[in-house]
Each structure stands twice: as C-alpha cells, then as structure tokens.
Image (tube, rainbow, N blue to C red):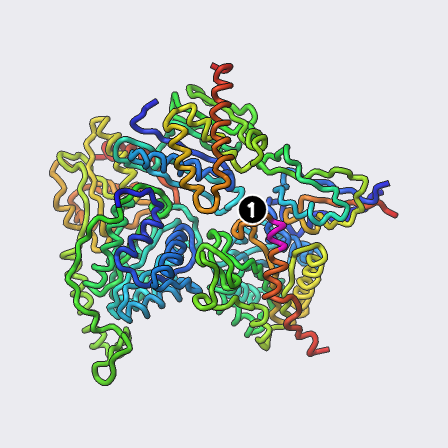
Amino acid sequence: MNMNSQKVTIAGFGGQGVMMIGQMLAYAATEENMHTLWFPSYGPETRGGTANCSVTISKKEINSPVFAKADTVIALNLPSYMKFAPKVQQGGILLYNESLITNPIQPEGIRVIGVPINDIAIKLGNPKVANMVIMGAYLELTHLFSEEAIVKVLKKLLGKGKEHLIDINIEAIKAGREHILKTRGQSC
Amino acid sequence: MNQIVYKKTKGLTDTELSYCPGCTHGIIHKLIGEILEELNVIDRSIGVASVGCSVFSYYYFNCDMQQAAHGRSCAVATGIKRSRPDSIVFTYQGDGDLGSIGIAEAIHAANRGENITVILANNAIYGMTGGQMAPTTLIGQKTTTSQAGRSEALHGLPMKISEIFAQIPKAAYVERVSLHNPQHVLKAKKALKKAFTYQMEKKGFTMIEFISTCPVNWGMTPNEALKWAKESMIEYFPLGVYKDSGDEHE
Amino acid sequence: MGKVLMKGNEAIALAAVKGGCDAFFGYPITPQNEIPEFLSKYMNEHGKVFVQAESEVAAINMVYGAAGSGVRAMTSSSSPGIALKQEGISYIAAAELPCLIVNVMRGGPGLGGIQPSQADYKQITRGGGNGDYQVIAFAPENLQETVDVVKESFEIADFYRNPVMIAVDGLIGQMMEPVDLDRPIRKRNLEEKKWATTGQSTGENRRIVTSIHLDPYDLERHSMKLFAKYQKIKENEQRYELINMKDAQFIIVAYGSMSRICRSSIELLSEQGIKVGMIRPITIWPYPKKAFDEIPASVKGILCAELSTGQMIDDVLISNNGRWKVNFFGRTGGVLPEPEEIVEAIKKMMGEV
Amino acid sequence: MPKGRVSFDIEKCKGCMLCVEVCPKKILVLDKVSLNKKGYNIIKVIDPDNCIGCAFCAIMCPDSVITVEKDKG
C-alpha cells in the first residue's frame, strides 16, 4: 500500500452518495494536513444517470487531478463497475456493491471484493447509508484513515440539522468493516 | 376476454425517462403523448424542448423535435410553425425557461398569436441546476439562492404566468391545471387536448400551465411534494381557465 | 486562517468578497452554481447586493449599472451564459467600467455539455462583442492561484477601468482542494472614481456613463485611447510560469487544468530520460509573449496542449514567430486527457524533428 | 372474480409510490426488500383479487410502468 499517494475513484448513479464518500476522504486527508484533491464528474441527472468522483491523497503536491489508473475503484452499480473495473492499477483493489452487481467478471492481478451494501443498509434500517457501508469496507481494506478520523469528518458534514443521522451512519461504517473482517477470514 | 384500460401511449418512445422518482414531468409527458395519439397527429407534430430537466424530452416524444437554447423555445417554435404551418407545434418549458430568461420570447409569440401550444411545467424551482429560486418560487420557500426563504422585499412576488398571458389579446386559450391526484390529471388532460384542438383549428396561441413538483430539490418524498403543491402552490396559483377565445366567438 | 478544504466555486465566491465585491448579479448555469448560491446568502447577511437576474444578458447589464455607479460589481457564468453577455462586456469596456467576470468554462459549441473545457479562448482573448476592445483575462491552474487572482482582480479592474475575466474550466470550479484565503495581494494606488454616477452631481460636473460616439473622429479618438490602455496592459501585466526549462528538449505550452495534467506528463517523461519544460500562461490576455524569449537553445520543438480543437495555438504561433516547430495536442467536448496521452504526443514529435 | 388486473414493468419502476397513494383498494405496497437493476425498490401488488381496474395507479405513474386490464362485463 503506497502511503505516499492514494488514488481512489468512486462511481455509481446519482443519489447513491458517491460524492460524499470521496469528499469525506478529502476532508480526512485535510484534517491530517496531507495534500488532497477531489473532483466530480456527473451527468445532468441528480437521480439515476451516472455519477463518479476521484480523490487523490498525497504527501506531496498533487499535479494532475486526472489519473489513468486508480489504486482503488469503488463501484456501486453495474454500469460503473463495467466502466471503471479496467481502471484499477495492478495490485490495486476493486470494491463493488454486491447487492446490485452479482458475480461480475473480475480483471486479473487485482483484489476484487464484493459487499452487499444495500442489503446491509436495509437491515440497519436506512437504505440511504449504503454508501457508508462501503466506506467502512474501504477503511478496513486500506487502513488509509482510522475510523475515528472518518467519524470526525462525518460529524462535521452531518452538522447542520442532520445530527440524527450520525449514529446510523457510524453503524453502517462499522457494519462495512465487520463484513470485510468476516469475509476475509474465508476468502484469503 | 380482458380489455386493456390503460397502457403506455405510442406518443412516447421506449426510452426510459431520466427524471427523478415521482417527478411530474413524467405525467405531463404521458398526457402529451396520449393526446398526440388520440388526435392522430404523432406524425404531424414538431416539439421544441427547452433547457432544464426536460432538455432531453426530445428522446421521449415520438415525433420530430428541436432542442432550443435556454428561454428561446417560443422563438424556435415560431420559426418552425411559420415554415411548416400544417404541422402541430408545441414547446415544453419550465418556469425558469419560460418565466425568467424566455419571458420576452413567450409574450411576443402570444402577442403575435402564433398558432402554437406552450406547455409550462411550473414547479417553482430550477431543477436541473440544483434547486435555485425561480420566478414562481413562493414567498418563504427556501431554495439554494433564497436560503432564508424568498422575501417579497428582496425578490418580489411569485409570477402569475397564466394570468399575465391571459391579458394578451391574441392568446386564444390559457388554463392552469394540476396533477396532484388522478381526477386532476384527467382534468389536465382535457385542458391540454383543448389547447391542441384550438391549434388544429388555427385559433392561435394556447398555453397550459401545469402545477408541478420537484421532490428532490424541495426535499420531500414524491407524495409529500404533490400534497405541498396542492396545499401551498394552488393557493397562490389558482387553477382554472384564464382565457378562452372560444367563448368570444360562440 | 490556514488551509481550508473548499470547492472551487465556493473559494471563488469567498475570494471575490475578500477582494471587495459589493454587488453580484448572476443566473443559474452548471457548472458555476455554487458561486451565486454562496453569494445569495453571504451578500444579504453582510448588507451587500445580490440579484439573481432573469437572464445572463440582464445580469451583465446590472453589472454595467452598478460598476457605472462606482461600486465593485461582478457576475459569474459558464460558456453559453458568457456568450449571452458579450454585448454587455463590449459596452462595459467601451464605457471604461471596472468589473469582474468569472467564466467557469464547459464544453461547447451550443448547449454543449457540462464537463470542463477551454474552447472559449478565442471569444475571451479576441473579444466576443463588437468593436476594438479587450478584456484582461486570467487562467489560473489550481484553487490557490484562482483565489489569489480573484482577490486581486478588482484592484486591476479599478486601476485600468476595464473588465477583468477569470477564465477557469468546470474542473477547477467543481474540484475541492485546501486553500488559504488570506494570502496578501498586491494593492494598486487607485484614484477616486470621479467618473461614477453617484447621483450627487448636476450642471456641468454631471457624470455620464456612455459608449455612444456618433462622430467617427470622436469614436476613433476614444478607440485610440482604449488602444493605448491595452498597450500599457500588454507591457505591464503579462504573467506566466516557466517550469523545468533548463536544457529542455521540448516545451509544452498549456494553461489551466491542461497545464496541471501536463505537469504529470513532464514527470513521466523525465523518468524516461526525456527533458520537457513548460510555459504556463497565467494571463491569456495579455498573452505572455515574453516567455518565448526565455526558451533555451536546447529546445527542438513546442507542443501546444489545450482542452479544445486548437485556439491558443494561434498565439503560440505568433509568439514563436517561426523559431521552433510547433505541434498541437487537444481533447475537447469536456474530455480530460490522461497524462500518458501528452507523453505520447511528445514522443511522436521526437520522431519528427 | 377480480374485475381488473395490473401489470408492472418493474425494471422501469423508480419506487416513487405515487400509485400506492391513489389505489382505492390499497393493494399496492413498496417492496422494501427486492431491488430492480437500477437499484430502486419496486412496487408489489399484495392482493390482486381486489383490483377493480380503475387505472388510478397507471394515470399517476410518471414512468408508464403500469398496464391495466379490465374484465369485459
């Protein structure tokens, strides 16, 4: 895991909370005063359509915001899996939403991990926190930031008028981490 | 033997609508498609898509379409209708497209009595650009450019578009309708059909204003949005026929 | 205040306020919406002017009125919206009114797309309005530079009594980076705006803001006066950055997000033992011709790289004046190239010299 | 003997629930578990025998997901 610079692309459809995952990583990086750059690229639809964002986290100045290959791709639906799976660096991680993507074809030379985030979120009682489930999975796989660092960012973002959502989002992060810990035992 | 009571109209293509769940744009699209089919003019119509969430409506209506610059649909429609007078021409515009940047083009199309049908989806907000204040945003309504709620002192009063257009002598038919329950959807369809019929009878400019919803930018569920539209919007924007030149001739 | 993670558009809005903006007039258009959204709240809370106009044409004319009354006025929009403002911008330049125009460029032509682009370069630097006029135009590369330039823009506009445009692309408007909003900027010594209509004068010291000159000799005199101003700006305000120039074999000329992508290409090339430098214009008008006199003798060719089908290349060819071979690399429509694509373009050029 | 029958093109459904609200016989519910390919929860008919073929659901549906049939009397 190259700790000097991490490139992550998160993709899905409008309304899945794709942008929030990326922005939280950027906020966490800023808190730990690393260099970071987040940028979105989305279609016109606020719901449905395509939405993806990329975030670079680095110890030194960041040049190009755009990168050919990512260290990690997080794909939340099938179209984004198909589009971004080829963009994972050799030895990188492809983390995907198993609720919407069932046994997809897996590129060579990278770790491909599925997490049924919608199902987990529904079981937790709020389908909207599915994005935090995969955030938890990502943290467990990369240890890029501690859970506390991400929870601190979460509290900042869910400040004005959304405090009641903090606990369920934290539960979702924990559920994502547990899923990795549980399944890693079997898969590796 | 079962009789089909309701099925998708041939006036719409098979392309899935890109609108958010529960957005009334979809309902208005269906009514237009059904009317084009019932009046048997699908292959005689030319629609003009504006700029806003409905910018991609040219993928959805099963007839020739042109996509106009923001606010210019009525001008584009004038150019089309004057060149193809036998075609049925309609514009599909939001309250920002027609009431804000396109108000001059719309008023002058009406003033000339252009024989076109203007469909106005009034959801009191800019949808595609992310929820900014529109000319029809209600007093007190919070949007991303009126975050403390629209105030009369700073932003003036919501624009009563049907009432304004009813003042224009050459406007032949202007009605404001709603979609907040099946009965009102059917009533709205009747109004829109009358507008298209007036166009076919060359009676001049017709406009139907649909009280519409924007669940995502209003921050409500689709059903809550319809309820809010019924209770808050209709109170300020009363439904009804504001101009019917048919009355004068009969 | 130290570094804060902010979205480009929000940083631009806050920087404009820190630069002394008294009045903002705008209209919704992607990808710049956060600017009017941020300012609609801020300006009202601080007793300043915010109006969401009925269109971009109305907004630039509101700027004309406010600037003509002596306040620091601005508008922001994106490509098709800026096209609507061209008449107003020509009038503002003609009437010698200072103002700030932020253009968050998106793919064109026509309604085009909403992804980043640099395809309005000619409109900005050659003028999309009528007559002999110019807009001072900056093309910053990252959020820190954007913030610093926006803060300085009112000083420059007031000093030269001319519109200043900040031309960024949708990527810069939409991306988030840590920025420091309190870096000091160069102040200019500015005269009192004795020409502004403040509604306090009558008789012969009435103040008139106009751009009509029916007598052709009068209009020519006025145009020559503007021309002299533009010559002075060309002389004093060219800004650029030279990167990795020493012993370079090739030079890239690029600005804004394209230059930032090229920085990674330069790194990749140097790992392969190919030394490539870059001239990065920070002002695109006045174009930094002076930079081309600093190209080392080791250089065999210039690659002009843009997010368009080639517009700045005209200025590169003029500035190059036949000295070096010039190739072009471009992606347009909102497509952002990966650094590797520019590496290939340089290698292709190596084979041609 | 049911007087009407509704069929849903579930891949086009966005789970907006406008139909659920207007069904006079309350036979439509949001299926909280299964999702369509687009990731939306879809609508389920709980007891089709009570359908009277009034088509209120189809009239309200913004995405033309519902087809309604009625028995010839």
Residue extending furthest right? D73
What chain does mark 1 sit on? B
Asked if residue B28 lies in the magenta stretch, the reply is: no
Image x and y of residue C22, in percent: 30, 63
Residue extending furthest bottom? C203
For the point 30% across and 56% down, the residue is: C17
Q: Residues within 10 Å of mark 1 (few under 14, many from 20)?
A: many
Report the residue marked by disc 1.
B18
Q: Left or right: A3 with respect to A185?
A: left
Query: Tag 1: residue type?
Result: Ser
**Of C181 and C36, the residue lying toward us:** C181
Q: Which of the 4 image quadrants contains residue A109?
A: top left
**Of B44 and A172, the residue lying toward us:** A172
Asked if residue B225 lies in the magenta stretch, the reply is: yes
For the point 77% across and 46% down, the residue is: D25
Image x and y of residue C134, in percent: 25, 61
Q: Left or right: B80 with respect to A143?
A: right
Magenta region: B222-227
Secondary structure that dominates the magenta span? helix
For the point 22% across and 52% down, the residue is: C283
Quarter of the figure with the C terminus of chain C: top left
Image x and y of residue C47, in percent: 34, 63
Image x and y of residue A157, in percent: 42, 41
Q: Secondary structure at mark 1?
A: loop
**Of A154 and B94, the residue lying toward us:** A154
Asked whether residue B13 is in view, the answer is yes
Asked whether residue C308 is in view, the answer is no
Q: Which of the 4 image quadrants contains residue A125?
A: top right
Q: Please state the total of marks drawn on the protein image.
A: 1
Q: Left or right: C166 with respect to B152?
A: left
Q: Say above or below: C280 vs A70.
A: below
